[in-house]
Image: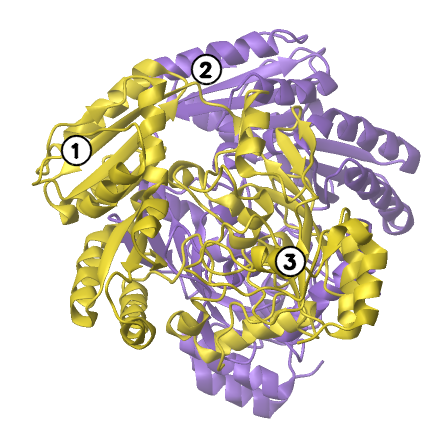
Chain colours: A yellow, B purple
Amino acid sequence: MAISPELLARLEAIVGPSYISIDPEVLKHYGHDETEDLVFPPNVVVKPGSTQEIAELLKVANQFKMPVTPIGARTGLSGGALCVYEGIGLSMERLNSIIEIDEQNLQVTVEPAVITQVLREAVAEKGLFYPVDPSSMGSCFIGGNVAENSGGARAVKYGVTKDYVLNLEVVLPNGEIIWTGANTLKNSTGYNLTQLMVGSEGTLGVITKIVLKLIPLNAHNILMLVPFFKAEEACEAVSALFRAGIVPSALEFMERDAIDFALRYVEGISIAVPDAVQAHLLIEVDGNYPEVLMQEAEKIMHVVEQFAIDEILFADTEDQKKALWKMRRSVAEAVKANSVYKEEDTVVPRYMLPELLTGVKKIGDKYGFKSVCYGHAGDGNLHINILKGDLTDAHWTHEVPKGIRELFELTVRLRGTLSGEHGIGLVQKNYMDIAFSKVHLELMERIKHVFDPNNILNPGKIFPDHL
Amino acid sequence: MAISPELLARLEAIVGPSYISIDPEVLKHYGHDETEDLVFPPNVVVKPGSTQEIAELLKVANQFKMPVTPIGARTGLSGGALCVYEGIGLSMERLNSIIEIDEQNLQVTVEPAVITQVLREAVAEKGLFYPVDPSSMGSCFIGGNVAENSGGARAVKYGVTKDYVLNLEVVLPNGEIIWTGANTLKNSTGYNLTQLMVGSEGTLGVITKIVLKLIPLNAHNILMLVPFFKAEEACEAVSALFRAGIVPSALEFMERDAIDFALRYVEGISIAVPDAVQAHLLIEVDGNYPEVLMQEAEKIMHVVEQFAIDEILFADTEDQKKALWKMRRSVAEAVKANSVYKEEDTVVPRYMLPELLTGVKKIGDKYGFKSVCYGHAGDGNLHINILKGDLTDAHWTHEVPKGIRELFELTVRLRGTLSGEHGIGLVQKNYMDIAFSKVHLELMERIKHVFDPNNILNPGKIFPDHL
């Protein structure tokens, strides 16, 4: 799709000449996120500075029926921000203010381009806690978290992004501006458009302000790394911990390969892992009473010792804790440094994890691919990185997707679904028929049409090519 | 609207002759809930026994363009189940099985007509906790809780119904059956139709199965009743408690009148309340470590003692705890036994409570009505019972609604909204313009149209008469 000089002039009049670009290098920069090696540049990048400017931009785009793709920090893993139909790349980067930390009501109002870690630190200074911590929190935007309903390591105790979003300012594709709800903890007033917007991947409206619930900050935590001799037993231990009444604040699974990749990739961490160890659980408990945490840690030890494990490593210092978390958070990057990969974000009821893991390996054998598995086991959320390695392009393009289809079929059979926290975006959309009937997909598509009758907003995402 | 013999025969063929009635007494019985003294009987009551029968019923109703109103336990407070356009009263009462308590995954699958208390007790026997406890939990259905997104006393720590709903089986108005999501704790797979359905008050589909998240049951709690000499200070203490880092498992506010009504109404409870006491807070903390709860209770005492309070009453025995909760849960019934009333379910950010309470009294003075206020103060959710008392019918019908309009305008000005947990239903729908712009209401109405193009399902609810 080409962009006309007239449209360019209209866009420039809205944002000003400093905030619009058609420089190919710039377009390419805004044309990729962290999904595989995909690049889909827009025809033009605009960087509006206000809700009002976004409203004006969308009105014009609608008039020209020009695709508009909201772009955040481009840390996404499902291609949600890729401009697959070119058009206007709507970079949200200038809307990056923390508008108000409301200490009286334990809420924060932010613009979408605030970096999640910056937000967490700003509220922590006031003794408040925003618990959602995607692995990319050091660079991702809170607006992207809302768009994809991101999770993270603490979701197992504290929930995901959707559980903290109270209210959203949204620009609809026709340029109208609404607040979806109210700044209240409870709300039974009309349809829940707030939750409809969360996880809608920028296809229903452009989020311009976000009101989040906060909770009091916990003072203490204990972090331990438990090495298992059998990967399936590590998965089994996950469900056993909950059945013992323990609610950890993090419960992360890493296959042997995941930890090996990370240890080679991250500097300054050395952990001796015996050859016989097949997997690790990284387990954290948090709270305000250290003596209670000690008791919880003992309960955890009691549960995991029923499985075949090596010696448990307790992080004694803040530096050790940071190192362990850095290792865990670096797995994806470490694997990527080694090979192009496709990442699947499967989620199942947590007791089904061992069966999922076994199934993934069998499917890998059948289709000839190697996978590295890790993720938020407490939520039943298993990230499966499928490595390209030495596979031919033909095999990668034609055979591996068949294996992925089988993998999602297994996931759904186990009462799970395609994506726990990354979204469907571009790269999973053609598997949607596995999770949803035609009736169901058409219902979603008609909802999309209510918001965006001209299909200008982030087209080519979520819905399969052939519905 | 009359119902044709042909349609009656079609309905009877679906549910069988034992489960259909046009007896006027039966119709009247199904024509009211707990909202004021309103009665809107259907033309016919049907009691289907399965999802499949409901699907067939909806297909026929659609063909005849006949209104269908899903009816639960009729404990609602917003008139959501009233058959305002007559038609078919769809009683869900026979779908009352607990299908599966999944102890491995901490989930339960139920049919909608399971009584909430029955569900809570069934999972508690397995050491599991379903925390949502509306005051009517001894008689309300879990399906009604989902339809209205009900809250309750424990919402302040544990959240409301929406926070526990993982997946729903829904019959769409055209008779198609879908599962809205997956049985997983996280889900970023397409639009969140689960959360769109929760709180949609039976206007988008008929919920036939519900998968709920459960958590481990806490072993201990401490319950205390704190008498305040100033009602506004009781409200102020609410926000002070959270700012001190305390997360109580219940934090309930009762005006002096509320407690007096309840004490007269409920037998077997005697609490001496000095004349100077204007309000009470009922505060509970729960957890697994009694010594921690003692520390939390001390922190609470430290906070509330900064206000003008009388002696704190600690519930020493299970019987005392039950008595205090019975008193709190009986307030609405006790007030009702005294006078016809309108109940408003206002919700604001909790720090705004004192201002809301003061405003309510001022508006009452202006419009000549007396109100009894109580509710879930920890959530900023204030129930306002407006008593008819000696007011003339003309005043009640024409003047009081003007006062209610001012009251909601105040609520929205304080960044709150119309309903925290009762829904909009029939009696609040003509105030919706206060909370939402025309654009916003039309968006909701178009979503309704996507699901229900013939507007057969629970017509006359949520949307104002003149949009």
Disc assigned to residue A303: 1
How packed is label 1: few (under 14 Cα within 10 Å), some, or many (20 or more)? some
**Chain of the residue where label 2 is placed in the rendered structure:** B
- Identify the residue shown where x is 44% and y is 18%: A219
Q: Label 3: which residue?
A: A191
Disc 3 from disc 2: Cα separation: 37 Å
Left or right of B136 in this view: A52 = right
**Chain of the residue where label 1 is placed in the rendered structure:** A
Quick one: SS at disc 2?
helix
How packed is label 2: few (under 14 Cα within 10 Å), some, or many (20 or more)? many
Corner quadrant of residue B414: top right
In this rendering, the answer to whether B326 lies above or below B196 is above
Corner quadrant of residue B53: bottom left
Quick one: SS at disc 3?
loop
Give A34 or A377, whichever is nearer the viewer: A34
Disc 2 residue type (three-letter): Glu
In this rendering, the answer to whether B300 lies above or below A326 is above
Q: Position of residue B72 (x, y in %)?
A: 52, 60
Q: Label 2: which residue?
A: B296
Looking at the rendered structure, whether the residues under marks 2 and 1 are on a common chain is answered as: no
